Image (cartoon, rainbow, N blue to C red):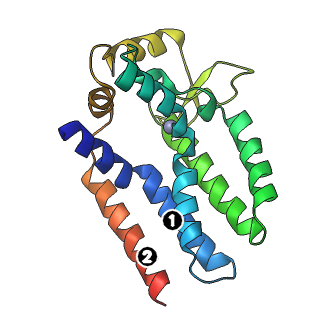
Amino acid sequence: MKSLIQFFAHVLFGVDMIVAMLAYALVLSVFPGDWNWWMLIGSVLFAHLPDLDMVPYFILKRFFGVQFRLSSHRVIGHYPIIVIPLVVVCVIGLADNNEMAWLTLAMIGIVGHFIHDSTEPQGLHWFSPISWDRITLMRGWPDKVSRYRWIRIHFSKGAAFNKSALDEFAQRVDPLMRGQILVWGLSAVLLLALYLI
Ligand SMILES: [Zn+2]
């Protein structure tokens, strides 16, 4: 139960949610059109879209008892050079109007998610499947993750073969920080103000 609460708190107050709120605030301010709940929901979905590749791992571990580290979930959803063009094509194909607004929401949400994931020490393989080099932004600039560092991180943080998927998630994520909650609150107030005016 504690892990479940931690999971939802992390999703609700997470950095990706802040990016989604700010992306919609920007779109609402820059593009013509009134408040659109679908766009807000879309923004939240775009900002979390890459993590959908966790779902099959989650189901296999939770319901079928397949044992592996959930932290290895970053597969197809976290391949920027595949996901970004695919989403651009889908958005242009599906959006009947406000194409540029939808495209802006999608790009901020998805690229923001990849940048956020890259701030972790294990980095993100930005050019997979062409190159499997992992790039981290943990120092503020792009830095290649050595094979040694990747193995060390992979086998320490989140090395939870015998835990449930939720427990492993709860163990792996960083605790919510006060600054993060503050930025979340300010973003929510900004959205509320845009909704009311
Ligand atoms: Zn991710």
Can residue 140 be seen here? The reply is no
Left or right of residue 2, residue 73 in this image? right
Helix or strand or loop: what does disc 1 sit on?
Answer: helix
Q: Assess disc 2: are there few (<14), some (14-19) or many (≥20) residues with their C-alpha within 10 Å of its C-alpha.
A: some
In terms of depth relative to the viewer, which is nearer, 137 or 127?
127
Seen at 57% across and 68% down, the residue is 38
The part of the image, by quadrant, that contains residue 4 is: top left
Callout 1 amino acid: Leu
Callout 2 amino acid: Leu
Q: Is residue 180 above or below residue 80?
A: below
The residue beneath circle 1 is 22
Can residue 124 be seen here? The reply is yes
Seen at 56% across and 45% down, the residue is 49
Q: Quadrant of the N terminus?
A: top left
Q: Which residue lies furthest to the front in this view?
A: 63
Cβ atoms at labels 2 and 1 below 8 Å apart: yes
Looking at marks 2 and 1 on the same chain, the residue that comes earlier in the sequence is marked by 1
Q: Where is residue 161 in the image (x, y as percent from the top left)?
A: 32, 13
Q: Position of residue 152 (x, y in %)?
A: 40, 12
Residue 185: numbered disc: none
Q: Where is residue 21 in the image (x, y as percent from the top left)?
A: 48, 64
Seen at 51% across and 65% down, the residue is 22
In terms of depth relative to the viewer, which is nearer, 52 or 100?
52
The residue beneath circle 2 is 190
Left or right of residue 70, residue 77 in this image? right
Q: Where is residue 55 in the image (x, y as percent from the top left)?
A: 48, 33
Q: Assess disc 1: are there few (<14), some (14-19) or many (≥20) residues with their C-alpha within 10 Å of its C-alpha.
A: many
